[in-house]
Amino acid sequence: MTAPSHPLTLQGTPSVVPGHKHVAIVDIGSNSIRLVVYDGRTRTPVALFNEKAVCALGQGLGSTNRLNQQGATEALAVLSRFVRLARAMAVDSLDILATAAVRDADDGQAFVEAIERRCGIAVTVLSGEEEAHLAALGVLCGIPEAEGTVADLGGGSLELVALEEGRFAGPYATMPLGVLRLSEGSGNVRAVAEEMIVRHFRGIDWWHRTKGRPLYAVGGAWRALARLCLAQTGHPLHVLDNFSLDRAESLRLIPLIASQSRKSLEKVPGLSKKRLPHLPVAALLLEKVIEFAEPSRLIFSVYGMREGQFYKRLPPEVQWQDPLIASCFDMAQTAGRFPEHGEEVLAWMAELFPNETAAQGRLRYAACLLGDVFWNEHPDYRAEQAFLRVFRLPFMGLGHQDRAALALAVHARYEGDGDLPIAAGARSLLSEEEQRRSRIIGLALRLGHSMSGGVPGILRNTRLYGDGDCLVLAVPADDPAFAPDLGDRRYDRLARAAGFERFEMRRLAVIR
């Protein structure tokens, strides 16, 4: 049996992109300039280097129509450093992308020419449409089947773009409602800012097309809000990507957070103090987007324009791969002893899950690929280390509930006894049935690996299935690999977890 049919799975195909090395992208924003160097050989954008400088190019743009001159001087020095570093890293490609501030400023073209003279490299000034589409591509990089509204908030502009089933639906909007512009234009007076936002939003005639679908919030100011929401709710996982709230909860939390004092906000771990002055307008913008878009859920994405540019460069056949499965496949290839065994054990346990959905099958596939990745951790801490790494690794395309389910499955695979405090937090995100399913997957992985030694080719000669109240393992009658007393406790634990009263090994001449 092969892996479950799913249009986004690798189906045994490596996720490595032939001939690609490192990819560097410089994002010249209205508030900050950032260089990210990615490992360009894989499906997922793994950042090897990430550095940001706050130059506030767009400060005062609304009143002067010109770039902040001090910021422009600082930006030239920063960009010279970034280009030098990227070239020293021998990157395959270096893209320098400028957004709203440079696009809209009267002296934006002169600034671009100054960069090109000083650094000897071309600068691409993105149109509003291009910026919107790259932000949407960044979301699709992590969630290929995404649909709804992508909202990307920067310092100089707000981009909105509609997605339908993993593709652009056509409509988009770009508006001068970045946090810098909105703060300056409104004088930080809420009523004035609200009037500015509503005036622009009423000009959008396609809100109905994404009503009742998710809203994906992109941008540093909204990531700061997500961090505050995590702290406010006591959420057990402090991973920003794919942190999700339903519409009612988001409309309750966001105004509450925006009304807190600066002193209380400063106590939140990991929150940049430079973000604090702009949080009220960022919160107001998000409130208004939710009110107009009427989404089913608010989903925070840490992937945006830069990841969209990375994704855009991937070959189509690699773009179509499931980012979670690609990451797990790469981990298995790098750290697993017998990486090809993952798909074999996936097929071996399949009869225990006769009615699983495609989403459930995807998570089980990921767990099987990760089933031998943590073999070299210290035995006393192996289950804990495996759980913590899976629960916290920056996987793409993995919601918090799915992340908890995957981590608990890997924890059970290494015989985790369930008393790890943080594991209780993961269980709190799941129903009892979801917890039970993760445990069955983990125990099946443990049994399959111990029986076969992790070596491919052994499990495919056996069959694991239910027969009434009995969990049956049918094995070849003449194969000495299957000793009757091998791991009897593991057999029984799996049988009980899967709802069977007993376990039985049957030695058969022919296994059907």
Image: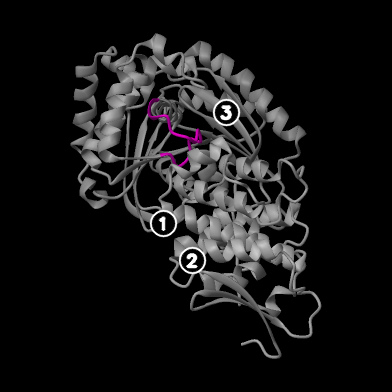
Residue 271 versus residue 352: which sits nearer the camera?
352
Residue where numbered disc 3 is placed: 34
Local crowd at mark 3 within 10 Å, few (<14), some, or many (≥20)?
Answer: some
The kind of residue tagged 2 is Gly
Residue 433 versus residue 209: which sits nearer the camera?
433
Instruction: Specify whether residue 453 is in view.
Output: yes
Q: From the image, which quarter does the N terminus lie in? A: bottom right
Give the CA separation, mark 1 to mark 3: 27 Å
Residue visible at 41% across and 22% down in the picture: 106
Q: Is residue 271 left or right of residue 205?
A: right
**Vertical order, 484 against 339 (above or below):** below
Q: From the image, which quarter does the C terminus lie in? A: bottom right
Tell me where the magenta segment starts and ends, as one range. 232-243
The kind of residue tagged 3 is Arg
> The residue tagged with tag 3: helix, strand or loop?
strand
Question: What colour-coding does the image apply?
Answer: one colour
Q: Is residue 301 left or right of residue 151?
A: right
Q: Is residue 234 in the magenta section? A: yes
Q: Are marks 1 and 3 in contact (CB under 8 Å)?
A: no
> The residue tagged with tag 2: helix, strand or loop?
loop
**Vertical order, 66 against 176 (above or below):** above
**Position of residue 62 measured from the top left corner of the image (x, y, whole percent):** 34, 18
Q: Is residue 367 in the magenta section? A: no
**Position of residue 201 measured from the top left corner of the image (x, y, whole percent):** 22, 35
Q: Where residue 146 is drawn, which disc sits there?
A: none
Q: Quadrant of residue 49?
A: top right
**Vertical order, 29 against 267 (above or below):** below
Give the CA separation, mark 2 to mark 1: 38 Å
The kind of residue tagged 1 is Gly
Residue where numbered disc 2 is placed: 499
Residue where numbered disc 1 is placed: 166
